[in-house]
Image (tube, rainbow, N blue to C red):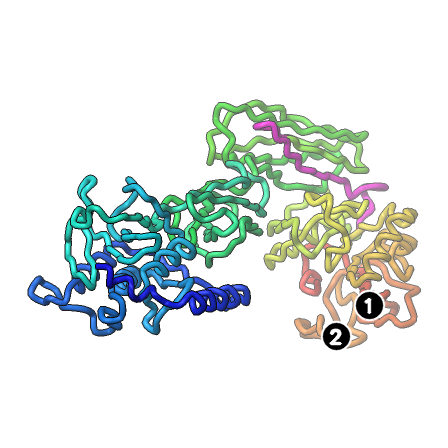
Amino acid sequence: MRSLRGFESISRSVRWCMRILVVLISALSLFVPKVIAYDRQAAIYYANMWATKDMSDDGRGYNPEYYDYTLEGGDCANFASQCLIAGGVTLSSVGYIDGKGCIPGAETLRQSLRTNHDALESGLLPDALTIGDIVFLVNGEAWHTLFVVDRIGNDIYINCHTDDRKHAPLTEFAGESMVYLSLDSTPPETTIEEGPGEYVDTPDVSFTWSGADDRTPSAELVYSCKLDNGDWSEYTTETSHSFSNLNEGKHTFYVKAMDRMANEDPTPAERSFTVGPPFILTVNPPFAEVSKGETVTHTVTIKNNYVPESETFSLSAYGFSPGWSVSGLDARFSLPPGRETSYTFMVANSGGYGDVDISVDALALGERKSQAVYDWSAEPYNPREHPDETYEISSSNYPTPWKIDTKSKIGILLSGWGNGLGHLLGRWNVETVGVKPDLTIVGEPNRSLSDLDVLLIGTGGLTGLDNSSTFRNKLAGFVNQGGVIISLTFQYGYELNALPGSPSGYGWSEDQSCHTNACYINTYHPIFTGQDSAILDASVDGYLTQWPSEAMILLRRTKNQMPAMIKYGYGQGKVVVLTLPSKTGKDRKLL
């Protein structure tokens, strides 16, 4: 047995040179141990197949694919190396390693496993010692290597080369000094340190996590994560991750740690959470034109996402303005998660002019949500003054719905009869958003007017606003930054002073209405592609008398050849002015 030490009898100077060379290579990051999970069963299968040179015992002799060091100091460490490689371990040595990836020296293999592969060494038989671990016979340094293939209680069975053994009891080596090397097969534990709670009212979430292992320092653990049924990420040392723009609904985040021996946490840490508000509050319609003596009904809908049924919802609506009243909504109720319910309230106009801002509030689970509602009257002055005497404007019955989307890039000024434009565009499924006379967007108080591409101003929409410097300045800023204004007919010519460029003309109260063959195409433009005649059979009430010099005159009145439609640039944007009213009729196809 002593002859097995022969391979270790290398001169001290050569041994030190080898160690210095390895240190230098490691410092240059050229020596990077490859992390592969250790498959102990595969290692045992190999150990039993190639245990002895005797082929009569269901074996195949020594594996011819590897070197045989029997006559060069012994093949025991080389055989143990082969078993480890069969189990998926790529050995990295503190000394010599041959071209097959094996470490033929017993002491070198011992030091390499302790240093590079997180093996724990014990002088006493450890409870954790199991198949696939290694026992070294030592006399100061290791001189023989035994590969553990079975354990029954405290009875250990080994395979080895040189003095070949297969399933031999370890007691055959009684009297020899031994050390036991237990390879790392204990997986790390993973913990989510920070992350969203059970419910989050935002589509953006972040997680941080940590790991702990019995052998690998926390700083050297690597992690993989995934969301829901997605693929696991590549392992990295990152301990945090963020997700953005998540869909509403339930999600589950998973993360698992892996140690230096590729032991993965078999029970990844996980956290489930639901994205979306506790409940959703909507009001339909969010705004309405209400003539004097009329009442409009608004419908409030609550959709409960995850408020417990034991909680109580509070729902109310309030608003005040002279000549207006808000009534009918003061509710307390419970609602199962996943269900919705609706209530109504009424807004009555008894004053005939002005507007009213209404706030609809819902409270549940300590969270308050508010929805702004805006109602207005299109009759600020004489209710009998309107651009089309053939229609009774106080009883509008539009044949198509208004398609409302608070994210739309097309705004409609909620003044005058702008609601007609909303219903008209709804016929072609064009979604629009309401803009109050203070130029804030209904339902999106933090959204800027400059976020719109187009602002539509309906019939009479400028009435009472021409004297507001704030309104004029905001409109000018909107167009100057690239916005487009399309403004329909007006009651008095001076109202056009509110528009950038300050055109002027005669409004419907200053002109005689013309209902047939009212205007003709003066300058060809793609917007007239749908017209089959140069003369438009459209209703016109008013015309322009002054306009910017660079304006393009698109339509002229047939009776006096004055402009009925112009287009001009202002800053980076454009302004279009028409003297056509926003009503149902043949002229709507022009819009």
Give 92 or 23, whichever is nearer the viewer.
23
Q: In this view, does 47 lie above or below 290?
A: below
Answer left or right for 495 relative to 294: right
Between marks 1 and 2, how big is the CA–CA gap? 11 Å
Residue picked out by circle 2: 525
Earlier sequence position, callout 1 versus callout 2: 2
What amino acid type should be assigned to the residue bearing mark 1? Lys
Residue 458 at x, y percent in the picture = 76, 53
Answer left or right for 200 relative to 451: left
Residue 177 at x, y percent in the picture = 27, 48
Give 96 or 197, whichever is nearer the viewer.
96
Tally of marks? 2
Q: Is residue 155 magenta?
A: no
Would you say the residues marked 1 and 2 are in contact, meaning their CB atoms lie under 8 Å apart? yes
Residue 367 at x, y percent in the picture = 61, 31
Magenta stretch? 362-386
Q: In this view, does 308 lie above or below 555?
A: above
Give 99 or 506, whichever is nearer the viewer.
99
Residue at x 25% of width, y 58% of height: 43
Image quadrant of residue 519? bottom right
Answer left or right for 478 relative to 348: right
Answer left or right for 489 relative to 50: right
